[in-house]
């Protein structure tokens, strides 16, 4: 959200995308509920959905932020990137924090048995990819060249 030349051209705060989807799904579920007759017991929903949310928050959210901070890097996408982080979850996904947002949507959908959120989650992934990840990748490829291209070849965008 800056015009700084040494930063990705990301124009939206990434967490707003899943947050808006979650809020919209709650409203849609109240106004126009979708019931497909599939509702595991509450305790099962809470264990599965809660496990996804907590696991995603710690492994794909908090851990990458801690790695960024230790490296003197800011996780906010419109700030300069001094180096390519390749430790921790960045070894198996180039975008652990965005993957965390998608997995969190799935977990919340399971907890709430909210089919609207199940339907909106792929849109969340698409919006993150097109409005956040692709501008970040273009910036990183331009800034780091072969080093980033090699990282792209070795590590998948999502999983």
Image (cartoon, helix red, strand yellow):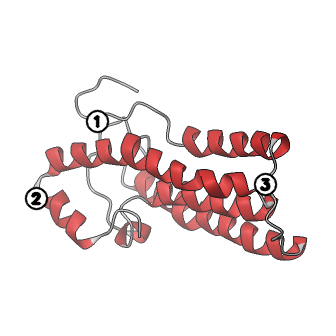
> In terms of secondary structure, where does tag 1 sit?
loop
Left or right relative to 42: residue 78: left
> Which residue is painted at 79% across and 65% down in the image?
36
Q: Nearer the viewer, mark 3 or mark 2?
A: 3
> Which residue is painted at 32% across and 65% down in the image?
86
> Which residue is painted at 72% across and 59% down in the image?
109
Which class describes the residues within 10 Å of circle 2: few (<14), some (14-19), or many (20+)? few
Which class describes the residues within 10 Å of circle 1: few (<14), some (14-19), or many (20+)? many
- State whether residue 140 is above or below residue 27: below
Left or right relative to 10: residue 31: right
Spot occupied by residue 28 in the image (x, y as percentages of width and height)? 76, 42
> In terms of secondary structure, where does tag 3 sit?
loop
Contact between marks 3 and 2 (CB within 8 A): the answer is no
Q: Say whether residue 42 is visible.
A: yes
Q: Nearer the viewer, mark 1 or mark 3?
A: 3
- State whether residue 46 is above or below residue 146: below
Residue receiving disc 3: 34
Residue receiving disc 2: 146
Q: Say whether residue 73 is visible.
A: no
Q: Earlier in the sequence, mark 2 or mark 1?
A: 1
Residue receiving disc 1: 7
Which class describes the residues within 10 Å of circle 3: few (<14), some (14-19), or many (20+)? few
> Which residue is painted at 46% across and 61% down in the image?
96
Spot occupied by residue 51 in the image (x, y as percentages of width and height)? 71, 71
Between residues 109 and 51, which one lies in front from this camera angle? 109
Q: Earlier in the sequence, mark 1 or mark 3?
A: 1
Q: Quadrant of residue 59?
A: bottom right
Spot occupied by residue 78 in the image (x, y as percentages of width and height)? 37, 35
Spatial distance from mark 2 to mark 1, Cα to Cα? 18 Å
Spatial distance from mark 1 to mark 3, Cα to Cα? 42 Å
> In terms of secondary structure, where does tag 2 sit?
helix
């Amino acid at each position: 959200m800056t015009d700084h030349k040494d930063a990705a051209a990301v124009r939206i705060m990434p967490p707003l995308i899943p947050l808006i989807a979650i809020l919209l799904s709650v409203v849609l579920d109240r106004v126009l509920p979708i019931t497909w007759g599939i509702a595991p017991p509450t305790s099962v929903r809470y264990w599965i959905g809660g496990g996804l949310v907590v696991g995603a928050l710690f492994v794909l959210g908090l851990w990458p932020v801690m790695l960024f901070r230790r490296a003197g890097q800011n996780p906010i996408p419109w700030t300069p990137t001094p180096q390519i982080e390749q430790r921790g979850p960045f070894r198996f996904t180039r975008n652990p924090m965005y993957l965390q947002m998608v997995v969190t949507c799935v977990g919340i959908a399971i907890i709430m048995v909210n089919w609207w959120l199940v339907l909106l989650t792929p849109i969340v992934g698409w919006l993150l990819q097109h409005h956040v990840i692709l501008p970040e990748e273009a910036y990183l490829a331009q800034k780091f060249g072969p080093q980033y291209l090699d990282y792209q070849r070795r590590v998948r965008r999502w999983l």
